Amino acid sequence: MSWRVAFHDQARSCRDLGSPFTATLLDGFAQLGLPEGLIAERITSWPGDISSNGASVPLRLAGALHGLVLEGMDPELAAFYPPQDLPSEAELHKAACTAIPRHEGYIDHRLNDAPQTNEVARATVLILAADALSERFDLPLILSELGASAGLNLNFDRFRLCAPGGDFGPSQSPVILTPNWRSPAPEPHGFTVAERQGVDLSPRDPVAERLRLLSFIWPDQTARFERISAALDLAAEHPPRVDQADAIDWLEERLSRHFAGYLHLVYHTVAWQYFPQPVQVRGEALLAEAGARATKDAPLARLSMEADGQGPGAKLTLRLWPGGTEHDLGRFDFHGRWIDWIAPKL
């Protein structure tokens, strides 16, 4: 895939997900080109897949430019960013192409790292699954998150999920989730988290790297920006533990432990799909082996929210041991705008 096609495709996705600003920015590069220099040379000769299915280079560049604005490094560029009115494609392109040579070193460094939005709206699914599992087993939960980034979603029991049948979580939580319910919402039961850990190849510090994490939020998505800001505040108060390691190596150690009297919930949200195929195969085998050892007083559950190419949104799946039963939980918007929830019959 050429870099221009990748930028166009990402622009289309941004527009579909409610960010006309980011779509305009990326379409401008695809249509009108990149300014000559190091950044253009690097992007146009990027090895491998630069699209959202690979290195997500368009979002790396968009995040770097937003970082310049958030860090107060380029007031001239900031004049074209929200809350200002959406500029024309040509105006925004000119502003971005003027800024890139001024901050070549900063942008070149930022291109090294993949986007990590740590979208906390995905916690809607985690809350609903944890609540259903607790209602079925009446056991406290041990959490293991794969691809946890800054670990914001390890605090999902501290978020408030608004639902027609009653809200889930603390009523005074600063993080409030308000998805559009496209299906009947369950009534809250309540659950307890006894222990929580996550893993990431490149974990981020929610305090020291706050602005970096926020830079990957699309600038015109104010509600999303405020929600993740609140989750970062919560993480500063309740620091999540995220180990730096290969996810499956780490998972092997976690699954080797017997959590008697607890339900072990392993989960991943838009992370598994980026693991290489051999890694996925190994992970599936480890989960199956651990599932064979699971008991009624130490059950194992795996919750998956991943793209499956079917759309809309991501597919939700729960596998539960002992027994290895699989439950279709419906579909969910990637940014948590809506949910089509199927309550599991456990």
Image (cartoon, helix red, strand yellow):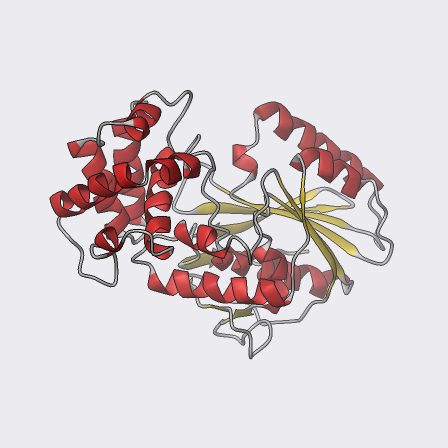
Residue 82: quadrant of the picture: bottom left
Image location of residue 251, percent across then percent down:
72, 39
Image location of residue 254, percent across then percent down:
77, 43
Image location of residue 110, percent across then percent down:
42, 39
Res. 181 visible in picture: no
Q: Is residue 127 left or right of residue 195?
A: left
Residue 12: quadrant of the picture: top left
Residue 202 in the image: above or below residue 34: below
Residue 319 in the image: above or below residue 284: below
Q: Nearer the viewer, residue 61 or 129?
A: 61
Q: Is residue 14 left or right of residue 145?
A: left
Residue 211 in the image: above or below residue 138: above
User: In what quadrant of the picture does the C terminus appear?
Assistant: bottom right
Q: Is residue 5 left or right of residue 254?
A: left
Res. 85 visible in picture: yes
User: In what quadrant of the picture does the N terminus appear?
Assistant: top left
Image location of residue 335, percent across then percent down:
42, 54
Q: Nearer the viewer, residue 159 or 118?
A: 118
